[in-house]
Every structure is written in C-alpha cells, then in structure tokens.
Image: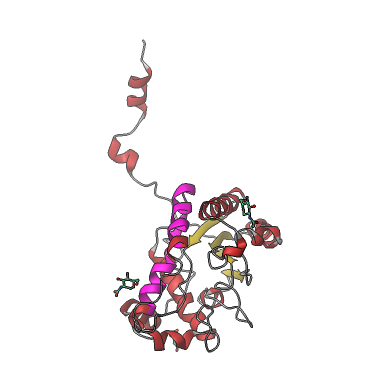
Amino acid sequence: MYFNTAALAALLLPPASLANAKPCHPCSPKPPAFILAGDSTTAVQAPGGGGWGNGFLSFLQSPPAWGVNKGHNGATTVSFVKGGDWATVTQLIDEKNAEGFQVWVTIQFGHNDQKPDKNISLSQYTHNLVNLARTVRKHDGHPILLTPLTRRSFPADSPHNATDSLHNERLHTIAAAEKSGTAYLDLNAASLKYVDSIGRDAAHAYDLKEGDLTHLNDWGSVVFGRMVADLLLESEAGTCLGSWIRRNETLSRAIREGVPA
Ligand SMILES: *[C@@H]1O[C@H](CO)[C@@H](O)[C@H](O)[C@H]1NC(C)=O
Ligand SMILES: *[C@@H]1O[C@H](CO)[C@@H](O)[C@H](O)[C@H]1NC(C)=O
Ligand SMILES: *[C@@H]1O[C@H](CO)[C@@H](O)[C@H](O)[C@H]1NC(C)=O
C-alpha cells in the first residue's frame, strides 16, 4: 500500500483543534530559584542604586523557594556581560538546577543602555536581550524579560503624566521577547500607569532620596516588587508559581486601583 506524504501526515496528525491546544504540563514539584539580572532599578538598596528586586524577593515563600538579586548599578546589556556578572548568573543557574530547583532568571535593562555615551543602538539592545534569554534556556533556566521600571519624572504642569522616557526600550524589550519566544512582563507600562494614577507627590514617596527620580527606597522596593510579583502570577509563565509567591491583597489592591500604597 502506498501513501503520499500529505496523506500520511493527515493520518498521523491530530485534528487541528487538538494540534493547536496548549500541551497540558503538570506543575513542577521543584521550588523556584529566582536570579534577578539587571541594572540599578533591580539592584539592592544602596547609595546610588536600588530597585524592585529585594521587594520582590521578600514575597517568596523561602525556604523552600530561593532568590538572589544580581542587579548591578550602572549596568547595560553590554557591561553586565563584559564585567562578569552574566558569568555569575549562568554559574548560579547550573548550581541551582543541580540542587533541584526550577530556575528562573529575570532580565531587565534599558536605563543605562539608552545613554548616548554607552553607544548601544536599539537594535543592539534587542539583540543582546535575545542572546541573554537564549543563554538562560541553554542552561535549562526559564528567562523572563521585563520592560524597564518607569522613572518618576513629571513635567512641571503634569502631576499625572510622567515623562515616558523609556518608551523605545519598552518596545524593543517586547520585540526581543517575541523574537526569542520568551515570556515578558510589561513593568514599564504597569509602573507608568501606576505613578500617573497616584500622581507626582505620592510617587516621590518611593524615591531613594530626595530628587532621585529613578531609584527606589525600601518601601518603593516592596511596592514595585509586589507589582512584579503580581504581573508574574497573572502571566502564563507564572501559572505554576502561585504556591511559592506569597500574596498581599492589601498591596495588590492598592496597585490595581491606582491608589498610593
Ligand atoms: C559606536 O558604535 C558603532 C557601532 O558599533 C561604532 O562603529 C562607533 O565607532 C562607536 N562610536 C563610538 C564613539 O564609540
Ligand atoms: C501625556 O504627555 C504626553 C507627552 O507630552 C502626551 O502625548 C499625552 O497625550 C499626555 N497624556 C495625557 C493623559 O495627558
Ligand atoms: C501586606 O503588606 C503590608 C505592607 O508591608 C503589611 O503591613 C501587611 O502586614 C501585609 N499583609 C499581609 C497579609 O502580609
């Protein structure tokens, strides 16, 4: 008996509706290990830097979940690799996999990549993010790209319309996610919407120090860390993470409703 290839394929393939259905993966019993890669808007609170990273990690059910903040003040997608931080991240992915964790790596850059003296074009930025995400997967980790946390800079006459200064980096982070088939969290849009809603004075309550419209103080880290946790839990990538990330409905509601937390 003779089948041509098309007929054979028709016999072997399930009906279209089944072929398009998402495979149903059971959740891994492994606890997550989160490695946070990025610039100062992810980094630990310190003079000259401080982001959402530690606030996010404070919501992990740890142990058994685990996390580390590898945000580096002043880092770009180039310097993070050249300066050795990325090698630390990939080594940690291997170690945490060997220890029995499911490893997640958040990747958030843009604040420094956009500075003219760094000479990093948007296409280079996209390309670098694609490479970072692919490298995480090569090491059996789960990459998540984040669009950059908004700055809290408002034009004098617009206390509810912060300057959208990372617009291009947002779009190119999303492009990198789509190009590499990577999950992304749109932190830029969520944080911009939130600070626009609460307004300038309330937004400045999160400033690392007076006049620092980029970095977050301890409380800002908790609030924007909660925002990241909620974006992750609501995303398809985060479907299985609900038992490892603690809830705080008080904070989540304030963020959702756009009132100061
Ligand atoms: C900026 O980068 C481009 C492309 O890599 C290079 O050709 C150029 O020389 C660089 N300019 C400076 C000032 O470093
Ligand atoms: C916010 O400012 C931008 C840039 O000036 C402007 O295009 C936009 O319409 C403003 N949005 C609102 C809601 O006022
Ligand atoms: C939620 O966070 C707020 C602010 O940190 C805290 O006061 C409150 O105790 C938290 N609630 C729960 C249930 O953890």
Residue 15: % across, % down: 29, 34
The residue sitting at 36% across, 11% down in the picture is 2
Tell me if I can see residue 7 in this picture: yes
Magenta residue span: 170-195
Left or right, residue 124 beside residue 161: right
Q: Nearer the viewer, residue 37 or 127?
A: 127
Picture coordinates of residue 28 (x, y %)?
50, 57
Above or below, 254 against 1 in this view is below
Looking at the picture, does residue 92 appear above or below residue 165? above
Image location (x, y in percent) of residue 140: 59, 51
Q: How is the image coloured?
A: secondary structure
Tell whether 60 sits left or right of 200. Answer: right
**Residue at 46% across / 88% down in the picture?**
205
Which quarter of the figure has residue 69? bottom right
Identify the residue at horizontal 57%, vertical 55% (top origin).
141
- The spot of residue 136 in percent (x, y) is 59, 53
